Amino acid sequence: MLSKLLALRNKIVALAAGMGASGLFIISFLDSSVLTFPIINDLLLIEFSIKRPARMPLYALCATLGSVAGCVLLYFLARRGGEAVFHRKAGRHAGVIRHWVEQNGFFGVLIAALLPPPTPFKIFVLAAGVFEIPLHSFTLAVLSARLFRYFGIGDLSIRYGAEALPYLEQHKWQVTVFAMSLIAVSYLLSRLILSRRHPHPPAGPNSSQDGSRPA
């Protein structure tokens, strides 16, 4: 079963790579909603932008809109009954993530969306839907983060893409250390978010032991 899913994912990536901007939209949409394509959309954006620099804004926009659309779809799926999925995915961090998105709203989603992998952003999307963060705040936060990410990647690809390849080859160890450091910083920031304490509501005569609201 796993091998079939991997084969399907590889076919989707190959198909999207040949479709240009529309393929980038599809990959970004799927990656942000029901499937996972780790950094594939970033790599496609870099490749397309280097080959056709004049179309970089289109590629970055398609990646942005696809990702936002995928996140909004996941948001609505969570809002219509995804609480069990959220708790299963978030595990022991469920309470902290809930507190983070409820207390910080727009900026909570924005910060989570700006953090690179391995930050589990989809869990924050699920939390935003389950705990009913306003749709306009959620959408604006994801849109802002994705515009910054994809237009930044596109701009860097045009500026340094072709010239960067020989440099990367000559300094592969330094680049590897830098990439690992970036991932480590991202991991520490995500752990900092997940380790923040959240206040527990005081127990009252009408509160149940599992924390559910009284009927």
Image (cartoon, grey):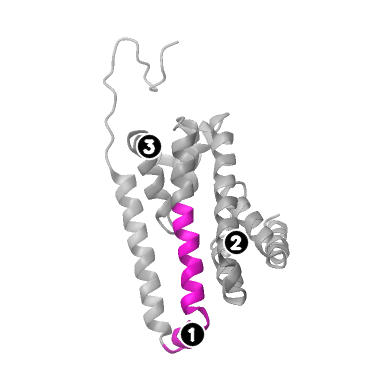
Please name the residue shown 46% across and 43% down the image: 140
Measured as percent of width and height from the top left, residue 93 is found at 38, 41
Measured as percent of width and height from the top left, residue 38 is found at 55, 60
Q: Nearer the viewer, mark 1 or mark 3?
A: 1
The kind of residue on which mark 2 rests is: Leu
Q: Quadrant of residue 187?
A: bottom left
Which of the two labelled residues, at mark 1 and mark 2, occupies the earlier sequence position? 2
Can residue 140 be spotted in the picture? yes
Which class describes the residues within 10 Å of circle 3: few (<14), some (14-19), or many (20+)? some
Please name the residue shown 37% across and 37% down the image: 105
Which class describes the residues within 10 Å of circle 2: few (<14), some (14-19), or many (20+)? some
Please name the residue shown 28% across and 28% down the image: 200
Q: Per the image, is 149 magenta? A: yes
Q: Nearer the viewer, mark 2 or mark 3?
A: 2
Label 1 secondary element: helix
The kind of residue on which mark 1 rests is: Glu
Label 3 secondary element: helix
The one of 122 and 109 positioned closer to us in this rendering: 109
Magenta stretch, overall SS: helix
Measured as percent of width and height from the top left, residue 94 is found at 41, 38
**Where does the magenta region start and end?**
145-170
Which class describes the residues within 10 Å of circle 1: few (<14), some (14-19), or many (20+)? few
According to the image, label 1 marks what residue? 163
According to the image, label 2 marks what residue? 58
Label 2 secondary element: helix
Find residue 105 and name its label. 3
Q: Quadrant of the C terminus?
A: top left
| Whole-number angstrom distance, CA of label 1 to CA of label 3 | 41 Å
The one of 83 and 101 positioned closer to us in this rendering: 101
Q: Per the image, is 33 magenta? A: no
| Whole-number angstrom distance, CA of label 1 to CA of label 2 | 22 Å
Which of the two labelled residues, at mark 2 and mark 3, occupies the earlier sequence position? 2
